[in-house]
Image (cartoon, grey):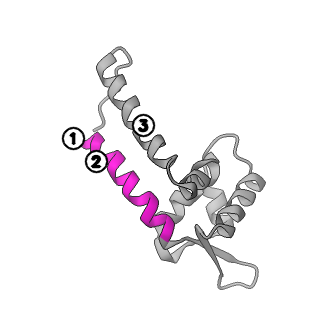
Amino acid sequence: MDKVFDANDDDRLREVVNRELDFVRSVGTDRNLILATSNQGAFEALLMLMLEHEEGLPVYRTLEQVRSRYASQSGIIKRLRVLREAGLIEARPGRKGSEVYLAPSREIIESLGPLLDQKFRKSEN
């Protein structure tokens, strides 16, 4: 079971904020990571695509699963297009003619994966 965060524990607050700062600063050193994380809804969609790895997900299913508030589907689609044009996600035809599958590129997995791993390994210690 997860521990309840105690907002009055200044040391713990400092620790978690410093971890997040490390993550944000690491992301800020790589142009592709900046692109991938600059839109909350699109970043959430990218993470879902990473869960599916090479199989990918249909665009419509990806959009349906985004839970970030204030993220419009049209805004996410535009951002995903930017990520595709940058080579960070790949698009391929689905089983149906109108279906498009998106999958993360090897490059974004190799860039973002280690940062996420490092971020959450620290929190487990």
Q: Which mark is residue 125?
A: 1
Q: Is residue 110 magenta?
A: yes
Residue nearer the viewer, 122 or 77: 122
Label at residue 20: 3
Where's residue 45, x and y in %? 59, 57
Q: Is residue 91 above or below residue 124?
A: below
Q: Is residue 69 left or right of residue 52?
A: right
Instruction: Please tell me whether residue 92 belongs to the stretch shown in magenta.
Output: no
| Amino acid beneath label 1 | Asn
Q: Residue at (58%, 55%) from the top-left corner?
A: 36
**Disc 3 secondary structure class:** helix
Q: Residue at x 70, y 84 (%)?
A: 96
Sequence-first disc among 1 and 3 = 3
- Three-letter amino acid code at the position of disc 3: Glu
Give the number of marks.
3
Residue 49, horizontal then vertical, whole percent: 53, 65
Please name which of the two marks, 1 or 3, marks the residue nearer to the observer: 3
Residue interval drawn in magenta: 107-125
User: Which amino acid does the dot numbered 2 rest on?
Assistant: Arg
